[in-house]
Amino acid sequence: MVKSRIVVGLSGGVDSSVAALLLVEQGHDVHGVFMKNWEDSHEAGYCSAAEDLEDARSVCDTLGIPLHQVSFTAEYRERVFRYFLDEYRRGRTPNPDILCNTEIKFRAFLDHARRLGAKRIATGHYVRREARDDQQHLLKGSDPNKDQSYFLYGLDQSQLASALFPVGDLHKQEVRDRAARAGLVTHAKKDSTGICFIGERPFREFLNRFLPAQPGPIRTPEGELLGEHAGLMFHTIGQRQGLGIGGRRDGDGAPWYVANKEPENNTLIVVQGHDHPALFHRRLRASQLHWIAGQAPTIPLHCQAKIRYRQHDQACVLDALDPRGATVRFLEPQRAITPGQSIVFYLADNCLGGGTIDAAWD
């Protein structure tokens, strides 16, 4: 590989720290960039942006590389957060991390890196990239417990060609061991969770700042009224906690789960039992499809898919494709298929692309 300037997106975590370390060891001209993308991230102590910045600065000092700071707050609010709120208004459950990657980390950040004189960027994602047959392929990370290809299915050929994923061949413990041996302050730091760039916050309190809560009825599929929900936006398909209803009056103490949301009448539909049939479906409809190769596959496509991060691959058939979306049929019924979430398609380790789930049925 020709030694060149590479800009690493440093989050203040161990994964991006080791990505920078590996590139330095390879002799590249490495620059770090710390992105700020949420204006009030310092408020209420829910986001560790200040601490993350200090950790990123410490890593750069240890590695002897420069650290740049950049704010993409306007881009984040316009390209990611607006969509996030619109989906909740519709009664759906969005996944902002996916849009955050395509629009911020691999678009706004890539543009900024080019202004810094770099042709390539690097991140700490656990994925691999392979150039083959005149195409860029996105492959699962070598660590099956950390693979993050699900979140990157929205990348295109140009973005992939400009990206490096130095830790994609490593397991998490190897990454921590490399960081410890190099004396990086992030070697034992806990992995971050929460909303992309916003951090860990009490979800209801945060969402209420931007969307008015609209209480409504909780009913069974048969129409029996069980109680009142605080707002459809606070619930997702398959959810058990936070419903505020007990067992049936007939003494069946099995817990309740969200089976459906009906935005048209602001009703939450719940069923009793983790394996209730209403929670399982074999088919779904997805839209906003994106194919990493740049073109749709030949139909029918027998492949695997995930309908949520960390799910094991599920055998399926992509058996209908049109300009508005795709129909997917699973070989086994899937539990809690959730509108607004993403379905991502694979052939073995090769991530083909994905789309946004709109509906599910038997």
Image: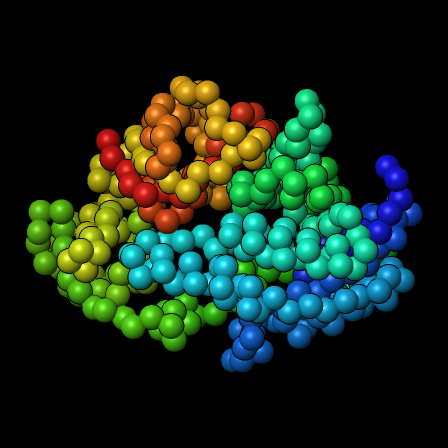
Vertical arrangement, residue 244 with respect to residue 6, above or below: below
x, y percent for residue 108? 63, 57
User: Going by the image, does 131 lie left or right of 29?
Assistant: left
The answer to which image quadrant residue 83 occupies is: bottom left
x, y percent for residue 131? 71, 30
Q: Nearer the viewer, residue 171 or 127?
A: 127
x, y percent for residue 161? 70, 39
Q: How is the image coloured?
A: rainbow
x 17%, y 65%: residue: 216
Visible residue check, residue 57: yes
Q: Residue furthest bottom?
A: 44
Vertical arrangement, residue 146 with respect to residue 70, above or below: above
Q: Nearer the viewer, residue 266 or 146?
A: 266
The answer to which image quadrant residue 273 occupies is: top left
Visible residue check, residue 199: no
The answer to which image quadrant residue 227 occupies is: bottom left
User: Going by the image, does 347 lie left or right of 335?
Assistant: right
x 76%, y 47%: residue: 120
Quarter occupied by the N terminus: top right
Q: Nearer the viewer, residue 251 or 335?
A: 335
x, y percent for residue 151? 54, 46
Vertical arrangement, residue 250 with respect to residue 299, above or below: below
| Labels in figure, total | 0
Q: Nearer the viewer, residue 288 or 219?
A: 288
Quarter occupied by the C terminus: top left
x 76%, y 59%: residue: 115
x 28%, y 34%: residue: 281
User: Going by the image, does 218 lie left or right of 190?
Assistant: left
